[in-house]
Image (cartoon, rainbow, N blue to C red):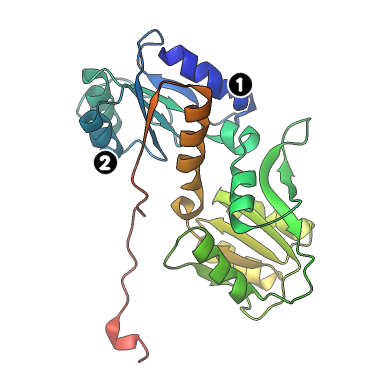
Amino acid sequence: MKVRDITDVLERMSPPSAACDWDNVGLMAGDKDAGVSRVLVTLDVDEAAIDKAVSCGADMIVSHHPLIFGSIKNVTCDSLTGSRLVKLLGNKIACFSMHTNFDICGSMGSIAADTLGLRDAATLEVTMPDGNGLGKVAEYTGDEVITAGEWASRVMKSFELDTVKVFGDMERPVRKIAIYPGSGSGAIKTALMQKVDLLVTGDIGHHAGIDAKAEGLTVIDAGHYGIEHVFIKYIAGYIGRECPGVDIVTADICSPFEVVFNPDRMEN
């Protein structure tokens, strides 16, 4: 199988035309006609992912976040992106990224909603004529009342996280919940317009969080990586089904940061 065969399969699911106009998706590096026997799937094309691709003999990396974001004037080891490209090309490893086109037509929101156990979820922010878009929103119709704090526990369990941040009332009963993988500050206005009680997302800054709380929206910040790492397992399975004969390797699931607690302020 060739690089172009795999990219064709992935672009049928998530057409590049669906990506946001500021985004960069598709083949970042490599020869479309090169043969592929092993693919590494990762969220980010960082040193750990590239080193694993080299060590395991991968011919191609498929990532969510683009290796190249914005213009570059040269490919040298004088820049971080350049050094990554040099290592990939030196080892004849192609790199393909599917970002907002996957968020919209993949769909990252559906996978995240399913992971959290949301049922009959609708698109939160419609961006396509067919109703596809970013994020998902659902009504919780169970008999029991589930608070924002209990949802926080569910988020940590569902996405295998050690911590989350919560802006808002932990005891608030939640009936309408939205999930917006990635950076979610821009989804707050949409969530408020749709009278969402709880928004699960990532990358919420201080001012966005306190303003959302003041306007009556509780926000769980599970981290950018914290939610979107579900991409790795999903795409690995998809390529495995659609491209028989290709060996699939996945990047290790590992948060890019650690939370350090002050032992002097921790309760016994």
| Position in image of residue 90 (x %, y %) | 21, 19
Q: Earlier in the sequence, mark 2 or mark 1?
A: 1
In which quadrant of the rendered view does residue 177 lie? bottom right
Mark 1: which amino acid?
Answer: Arg
* 246 is higher (above) or lower (below) than 204: above
Which of 136 and 154 lies nearest the eye of the viewer? 154
SS for dot 2:
helix
The 10 Å Cα crowd at callout 1, few under 14, some 14 to 19, many 20 or more, is few
Residue holding disc 1:
12
* 157 is higher (above) or lower (below) than 187: below
Residue at 60%, 46% in the rendered image: 111
Q: Is residue 93 left or right of residue 131?
A: left
Which of 186 and 34 lies nearest the eye of the viewer? 34
Does residue 68 appear in this view? no
**Circle on res. 55:** none
Mark 2: which amino acid?
Answer: Ala
Residue at 65%, 45% in the rendered image: 110
| Position in image of residue 71 (x %, y %) | 41, 25
Residue at 26%, 38% in the rendered image: 47
Measured in 3D between alpha carbons, the distance from the residue under mark 2 to the one under mark 1, in whole angstroms, is 29 Å
Residue holding disc 2:
48
Which of 162 and 124 lies nearest the eye of the viewer? 162
In this view, the residue farthest toward the bottom is 268
